[in-house]
Amino acid sequence: MFVGNVLPSTIGGDVVRVSRVGAETGSPSDAFGSVALERLTGFIALPLLVAVGIAVHPSVMSAPHAWLPLLVAGATLALLTVVITAAGHPRLAGRFADHENWTRYLGAVHRGVDRLRRDPRRAVPVIATAVAYQCSVVAVYAFIMRALQIPVGFGTLLVYAPAVLMLQVLPVSLAGLGVREGALVLLLHDTLARHDLPDSRAVAAGLLWYACMLLVSMLGAPAFAFGDRKSTRLNSSHRT
C-alpha cells in the first residue's frame, strides 16, 4: 500500500509484492500469479457491492448520475470475464504454463485459475476477505462524509464508493488523484447542490480519503525499507 500510494496508479505496490514474495518462495512466476488473482478478486467484490447497494437502497437509481456506477461495474465485470476466460483457457494462457521465459508468468495465472475452477471452495474465503476489505474502505468514505457534513447515506455509498474505487485504478494519474475527486464531484453534485454545499466538499472528501490511506500505509514504509533483510539472511543461512 505504501508503494502503491506514492507511485503512479497501484502498479508499484504489485511489483513490490511480486518481487518480495518471489524472493521468499523462490518462484517469481507463482508470486505474479498470486498477486494477479488477488487483484481479480477486488474486481469481483466491487461490482458485487454496487449490486448490494442498489438492492439495499434502490432509490439511488433515481439520481441523475446513477448510470455511472452501473456502467463502471458492468465494464469491470465484462473485462473480468474476458481476463478469466483467457487466463483459464488451455489454448490461450494455458499454453505458456510450461515455458521458461517471461511468458511463464501468464502460465502461472492460468494454473491459479485452473486450480480454482477445479476446487471452487478455495475461492470462497479469498473473495469473502476481498468483500470485507472493500466494505472497510466504503466505511472510511462514510466517516469522511460525516466529518465533512455531506448528507450521503451508507446505502448510497455502497453504490458510489466502489465505482470510484474502480475508476481510480486507471493508470492515468498518481494514485488516482484527480480521477477520484472528479468522479466524486460528478456523483455528489446534485446532493451537494440541494443542500447549498459547494462541489469542493466532494474534492475534499477524495483528498481526505487519499490522506487517510497514505497515513495508514506509511506504517509499511519501514517494512519496505528493511523487511527483506531478515529473510535474505535467513535464506543465506539455510543455503549455508
Image: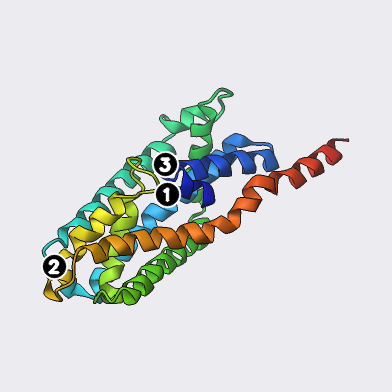
Quadrant location of the C terminus?
top right
Outermost residue on the right side: it is 240
Left or right: where 6 falls relative to 86: right
Q: Which residue is mark 2?
A: 190
Percent coordinates x, y for residue 127 in the rendering: 46, 60
- In the displayed structure, 171 sits above or below 196; it is above
Question: How far is disc 3 from disc 1 in space, using C-alphas?
Answer: 19 Å
> What residue is at 60 percent from the left and 51 percent from the top?
221
For marks 3 and 2, the one nearer the N-term is 3
Question: Badges 3 and 1: C-beta atoms under 8 Å apart?
Answer: no
Observer able to see residue 117: no
Question: How far is disc 3 from disc 2 in space, using C-alphas?
Answer: 31 Å
Q: Which residue is mark 3?
A: 8
- In the displayed structure, 163 sits above or below 97; it is below
Percent coordinates x, y for residue 94 in the rendering: 47, 32
Q: Which residue is mark 1?
A: 40
